[in-house]
Image (spheres, helix red, strand yellow):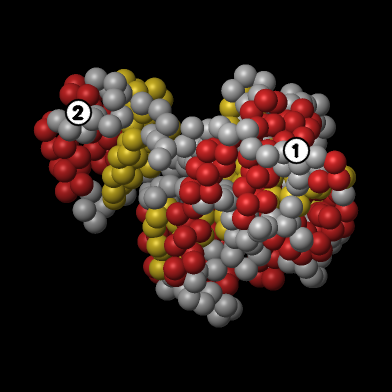
Amino acid sequence: MSKKHFGTDGIRGVANSKLTPELALSLGRAAGQWLRKSGMTARVVVGRDTRKSGPMIEMALSAGFNSAGVDVVSIGVAPTPAVSFVARTGDFSLGIVISASHNPFEDNGIKMIGPNGHKLPDEVEIEIERLMEEDSHRATGGGIGTVSYSPELVAGYLDMLMSIVPSGLAGMKIAVDGANGAAYAMGPELLKKLGAEVVATAVEPDGVNINLHCGATHPDTIQSLTKESGACFGVSFDGDADRAVFSDSKGRLINGDRTIGIWAEHEQSVGRLVPPVVVGTVMTNGGFEHYAVTKGIQLERTPVGDKYVSQRIGETKARIGGEQSGHIIFPERGPTGDGLVTMLELLRVIVESKRDAASYYDAYEPWPQLLTNMKVADRSTWNDGELVQSAIEQATKDLVGRGRINVRSSGTQNLVRVMVEADTYDLRDLVSASVVGAITREAGGEIVNKTDLTYALGD
């Protein structure tokens, strides 16, 4: 059975259009009914980002839970990983995040996190959707749930973060881009408590400026701020702070690949990278992989998506895994990506190694990588033709020992993504043109955009 409302990362859409208060009310009541039927504690914790629509959706969702006899505890504006931490360490059956992450402000979303800190399995989301279609029993009288506000519940999360760099950050000047999002206050305040001097931008949310020319999807902002302010390090969060990207003092981007590389190299050098494995995705740069091998570190690749990275971390017992986008998982700190944890783990390595971020930048040269997004008539049949299949087969042969190609269709749009990586720009561009040309001629493909990912962020 397919899902009607839930996507790959909860329910997301334009607030008050696709994601309406009525939908939030129905979802809350259905999820509450599922909790009661499952015999779980009738108590959930809710956090949100800074979008103008957040309080509206939170109130409607809370009313739905209350109608089912479930108590709601709000922690207000808080990063997604903070909600996950509170849900898995407190007396809660669900954590609810109201955020559309890096999307424009007019969007919003609802993500449900289980008591183990992971998002709910597909079968549970399907059951909740089924209950949304029913007008089941509603609580009355003393059975109706309550709403309370307890921002102090994030104290345990903050204590965990503070413990990552026990020696503190005195003497360091750090630039912060808060994305006008969920970590706009927590990020700078945390660094100041650790003794750093902080220069910050995008820390004045007004409900409509979240992710607007700022945040992790606009890394040029933090790169410029870090260099111009004379900071030794810069960090940029996305809207819900479950990921972060960084800048060195020269204004050079430290994406997810480089973050994993810096951290893993240090842990390996001091004998703590056990097992000597890191998890990446099909987008992880081949230059990084070759570098890792020279350090005795094995890269395990997964499909794009945090759930696949998390699964492979569990299978390999790796201590780190993530994506170029800056979505990094440290399983010893939590089961999902956490921009604040990633920031502090990277700063801990810098402090322990007595090096600055810039000194790590030239550790390896990324291989040229090009991503081409193509609009096609049908994402399920685009590769049925002989011409496309032959072009991909030939490309694979041409890249043996010198690169790789990954061609995949979007899960939600009629788009095909062609990623080609090679050890030279000429080979990369030649192979890419061949495959893109075949898709254009045989599948009616039309180029939407091209992105050089060599020194940038993957999706």
SS for dot 2 = helix
Q: Position of residue 358 (x, y in %)?
A: 62, 54
Label 1 or label 2, whichever lies nearer to me, is: 1
Give the image quarter of residue 335: bottom right
Q: Is residue 180 left or right of residue 424?
A: right
SS for dot 1 = helix
Residue lying at 47% horizontally and 73% vertically, measured from the top left: 276
Q: Position of residue 415 (x, y in %)?
A: 36, 28
The disc placed on residue 325 is none
Give the image quarter of residue 161: bottom right
Circle 1 crowding by C-alpha within 10 Å: few under 14, some 14–19, many from 20 = many
Specify whether residue 337 is in view.
Answer: no
Amino acid type at image mark 2: Ala
Specify whether residue 25 is in view.
Answer: yes
User: Which one is in front, 161 or 111?
Assistant: 111
User: Which one is in front, 248 or 221?
Assistant: 221
Amino acid type at image mark 1: Ser
Residue lying at 81% horizontally and 62% vertically, measured from the top left: 156
- In the picture shown, does residue 338 fall above or below 443? below
Residue lying at 48% horizontally and 76% vertically, measured from the top left: 275
Residue lying at 17% horizontally and 48% vertically, measured from the top left: 397
Measure how far apart labels 1 and 2 are at the Cα level.
56 Å
Pointer 1 or 2: first along the chain? 1
